[in-house]
Amino acid sequence: MNSINEPARFQGAAKYVLDEELAKIVNVSIVLEMPLLLKGEPGTGKTMLAYAIAESLAMPLIVLNVKSSMKLLDALYQYDTLTRLNDSRFGDSKREVSNIEEYIRMGKIGQAFVSDCRTVLLIDEIDKADTDFQDDMLDILDQMQFDIIEIDRTVTARHRPVIIITSNAKKDLSDPFLGRCNFHHIAFPDPEMMRMILNVHFPKLSEGLAKACLAAFYRLREFRGIEKKPATRELINWIRALQADPDFDLRSLEKGNLPCLGVLFKKSVDLDLAIQQTGGSRR
Amino acid sequence: MFVDFFYSLRERGVPVTPTSFLRLQKALALGVIDSVDDFYTAARSILVKSERYFDTYDQVFARHFRGEPFEEISDIEWIDIAKSLLEEWLKRPKGLAEAFGLDEKQLARYTPEELIQYLLDRLKDQRGAHHGGTRWIGTGGTSPVGHSGHHPGGLRVGGASRNKSAVKVAMERRYRDYNQEGPLTELQMGEALKRLRRMIPHGPRDVVNVAKTITETMRNGGEISIVFDRRLTDRLKVILLIDNGGWSMDPYVDIVQTLFNYARSQFKDLKIYYFHNTIYGRVWSDPQRHLRPEAIEEFARRNPDTRLIIVGDASMAPYELMGANGSLYVGQKDSRSSEARLKFLARLFRHAVWLNPQTEADWHYTWTVEAIGKIFPMFELTLDGLERAVRHLMKKN
């Protein structure tokens, strides 16, 4: 394994507002060659962080979106039996049928291992898979190698990827899993941080509008019974919607009228509750 | 370096492992940490693996590096206090019995271990009272920060409900094992629930059956004939109905929550509803039982193969169960008795169980427990009971 002597330092990216604490944690994890497990409410930028790291360190990003039905093998490699069968029947492809290796395709983790340069591997929403998947995967990420049974070959990582794992789960992951990761919980950004995030996305946003939107946004998050609270993404879309709305009037927003609530609340139950609690009418 | 820090974290109940501690040393050696601030962040991400312990970590860190004292007395110190009180009592039984408002003979029946536990609990109550709190029931269940892995959970001394006195609940300490060895027992609970699954082929035929394909291709004289199978998926649907109201369930909040957490990750389709005491016309899908009601009749639309699990102590006044308008809540008019509702549910779902957090030995004291036990098969909410319940739910017929 090639370790990089002069570790690149992560310092944030163009569209990502990074707090200093998180930057330190990312850098420590890179140096220690440990996967970094990120938890936190949806919309706190867990996934975006991986994109930002890839951009800032100029490494290719490989994303493994974990699904509940996923098997670990799918993430490592696939043996394409059907194509091989087809080739053996018709014999019109350039592939050598007797060479099984030509029918092995790398999965996302496999791709990260065989890549020519160091990559950022994002394993998104690990909590969707079952515990066995999680533990087995960490074994592989620990040893940085896996076997391809069909051709009896061991794939070893050429460069240890920078691994970012995200989880939305309320409950903790298993102990062996946690033991092998560094951990950080991203808190929901406070209004000040949010203002900076908005600045990145809307460089020309007026102070008055930003203030009114932020106040309204944090008030909406306090509403009772909301299943899916609006997060950063919703706020950004909302401001976009407000800017595009020709009827929009800043003074009416400051008075407490909230247009385009549908952008903030994605579930009809939540939307109804929010409308009830603002006392407004649906638009 | 920082060995003391490591041990004080452990003492305060943060599960830090030696491996992660060594990793921290490695980070220090590699020179990526060059200020106290760096150390604070790096050590937290390396040592502490859950945000639940962040607060404790902060406290330990503050004490260790800034000399701030702990706000609270640790459990170990409490035990010392309790021990000294016990010694005091051995010298002067009467005085102490009076101090705690207990009968001297009653005290004498306890084993020393029980007694220390009892004193410990009482001392903690005392502290709660000093802070002006009158309602400290169930604080152990909601406290986000565990103290040395011990939750003083669910004591009731302030106001006894029905015939269950606080001392009794405290003394039983049936959930001590769950408290002290949480992770282990939770794991076991998960294992017990794991059997509750049914793998059947489902969905589109999109998996190639290689063996069958080859056979079929041979039979076809070499023309490829591909055989697809359906994937095996877990199709088990579960409805969990939880009694989360009333003081009588408070001591069990912890254990029921553990069950929830496991249930959530275990099943493909899980619906959780809440009720208070027993089931009348509707149940709620929000724990406050306020915003999202669902009528019992709606359950008829569910798949009858759905497994129904009801968790509750089944203890109430007989009229609440049998009366046509037995609900405690004003304005919740109901034409049918709760008993009729329960029977309706039992008819809808062939696979149903009632889990009771009270020990089986206590069941015959309460009339309604027996009555409900006739409608639903009832099991103790213990590992053993859970396993038997799962076995019952997975029966074929």
Image (cartoon, coloured by chain):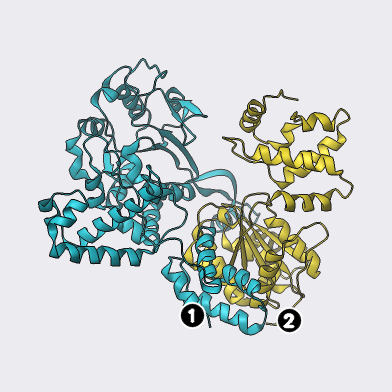
Secondary structure under tag 2 reads loop
Q: Position of residue A189 (x, y in %)?
A: 69, 52
Does residue B80 lie above or below A253 as drawn? below
Q: Position of residue B375 (x, y in %)?
A: 27, 30
- State the residue position of label 1: B3
Image location (x, y in percent) of residue A150: 59, 71
- SS category of the residue bearing label 1: helix
**Label 1 crowding class (10 Å Cα cut-off): few <14, some 14-19, many 20+?**
few
Give percent across and percent down for residue B48: 53, 66
Left or right of residue A17: residue B51: left
Chain holding disc 2: A
Q: Which residue is mark 2?
A: A4
- x 45%, y 75%: residue: B7
Residue B262 seen anywhere in this rendered image of the structure: yes
Q: Nearer the viewer, residue A10 or A80?
A: A10
Q: Extreme left residue here?
A: B105
Asked if disc 1 and disc 2 are in contact, CB closer than 8 Å, the reply is: no
Q: Nearer the viewer, residue B251 or A86?
A: B251
Amino acid marked by disc 1: Val
Q: Nearer the viewer, residue B169 or B303?
A: B169
Question: In the rendered image of this protein, which colour is used for chain B?
Answer: cyan
Q: Residue at x 56, y 35 (%)?
A: A225
Q: Residue at x 34, y 33 (%)?
A: B350
Q: Chain of mark 1?
A: B
Q: Is residue A102 visible?
A: no
Chain A in the picture: what colour? Answer: yellow
